[in-house]
DNA sequence: GTTGAAACCTCAGATCC
DNA sequence: GGATCTGAGGTTTCAAC
């Protein structure tokens, strides 16, 4: 799908405020409501917009701890990589799992209610997983920047 | 703010689908529309809901490359940490910046349009920043899991 | 103090140009 | 892309529990 200037403006605005009404969106990008809505639907259809999400305060929801874990596996055969990803997919506290090049095979973002809870996840769910060679984890002290998505325009 | 069972259900649903209509939300949590809307507004007011965002496909927007960079600084004095965070805040391709404990001081999530562009950000904006001792970066091969927010319920 | 019913008003979505 | 229309949804008011 080719995106013109107006499409990009729409995406930028919805990335900022996903609940903006279509009429406000239309005004901001210089269209009337119907063509604006058609563009939004087309962007959703094409998968450019993958969904809309409320951003919640993790701490107020009982997850003040965020940890990054760097995982190395013993085998990097595709089957073993997929097995690890499937294992991780079933652990709700692991929010992100990215496969990397280099020495570290995966970086995980994990949330927890406290350090004890994190330690339990680490020692009962992550470290004993099949094929895991090493896990190095670092606590997040603070998050200075947390932008959703990509820079548009 | 204390969250009861219904508040948590609302948050869980809006985290999944941030554009769900209030009437559908109300039905799903077993309320009528007005009290449901009041709860949502209260959650927004209290900062439990920090915002709503469209999730866009980075590749289709011209950012197929995601890199994690581990940064160590020469000085960890608070003033120097803040200076680095301010430096990072001004670089739009750096989407996240988390301060960690341990040897690595910061982990950054960076998006780029191609490897050359990433290399340019690295060598012209990040490595030469004041106080930077070392930057180790890893390309993301693929993202197996990417959940927004925290597990609710 | 929170819910629910009713009224109002704005918006989403379809149709046609 | 824009104009018009209709039904659905958002929002406020107020009574009731």
Image (cartoon, coloured by chain):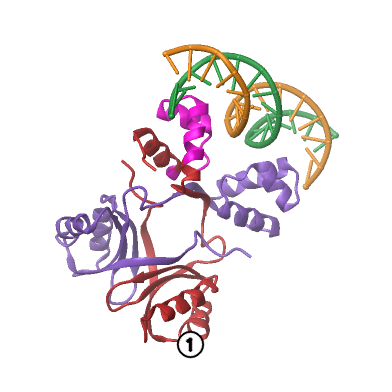
Chain colours: A purple, B red, C green, D orange
The spot of residue B150 in percent (x, y) is 35, 50
User: Would residue A11 be found to the left or right of residue B51 on screen?
Assistant: right
Task: Give B88 or B122, whichever is nearer the viewer.
Answer: B88
The chain that hosts pointer 1 is B
Q: Say few, some or many: other residues with alpha carbon within 10 Å of mark 1 (under 14 / 14 to 19 / 20 or more).
A: few
Q: Tell me which residue sits at (41%, 30%) in the image.
A: B29
Answer with the quarter of the image where residue A127 lies.
bottom left
Q: Secondary structure at mark 1?
A: loop
Vertically, is D5 above or below B69? above
Vertically, is C14 above or below B48? above
Q: Tell me which residue sits at (32%, 56%) in the image.
A: A64
- The magenta segment is B15-42
The spot of residue B73 in percent (x, y) is 37, 83
Task: Give A83 or B124, whichever is nearer the viewer.
Answer: B124
> Is residue B34 inside the magenta stretch?
yes
- Judged by its main secondary structure, the magenta piece is helix
Q: Tell me which residue sits at (63%, 42%) in the image.
A: A21
Vertically, is D16 above or below A134? above
Task: Give B81 or A29, whichever is nearer the viewer.
Answer: B81
User: Would residue B151 be found to the left or right of residue B30 on screen?
Assistant: left
Q: Tell me which residue sits at (38%, 64%) in the image.
A: B142
> Is residue A28 inside the magenta stretch?
no
* Residue beneath disc 1: B128
For the N terminus of chain B, which image quadrant? top left
Task: Give B37 or B25, whichever is nearer the viewer.
Answer: B37
The spot of residue B130 in percent (x, y) is 47, 86
The spot of residue A49 in percent (x, y) is 54, 51
């Amino acid at each position: 799908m080719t995106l013109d200037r107006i499409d990009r403006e729409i995406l930028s605005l919805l990335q900022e405020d996903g609940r903006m009404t279509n009429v406000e969106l239309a005004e901001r990008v210089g269209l009337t409501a119907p063509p604006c809505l058609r563009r939004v639907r087309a962007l959703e259809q094409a998968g450019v917009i993958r969904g809309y999400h409320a951003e919640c305060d993790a701490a107020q929801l009982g997850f003040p701890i965020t940890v990054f874990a760097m995982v190395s596996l013993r085998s990097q055969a595709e089957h073993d990589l997929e097995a690890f990803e499937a294992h991780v997919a079933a652990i709700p506290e692991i929010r992100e799992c990215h496969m990397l090049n280099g020495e570290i095979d995966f970086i995980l973002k994990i949330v927890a209610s406290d350090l004890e809870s994190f330690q339990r996840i680490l020692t009962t769910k992550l470290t004993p997983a099949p094929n895991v060679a090493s896990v190095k984890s670092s606590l997040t002290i603070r998050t200075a920047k947390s932008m959703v998505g990509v820079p548009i325009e």
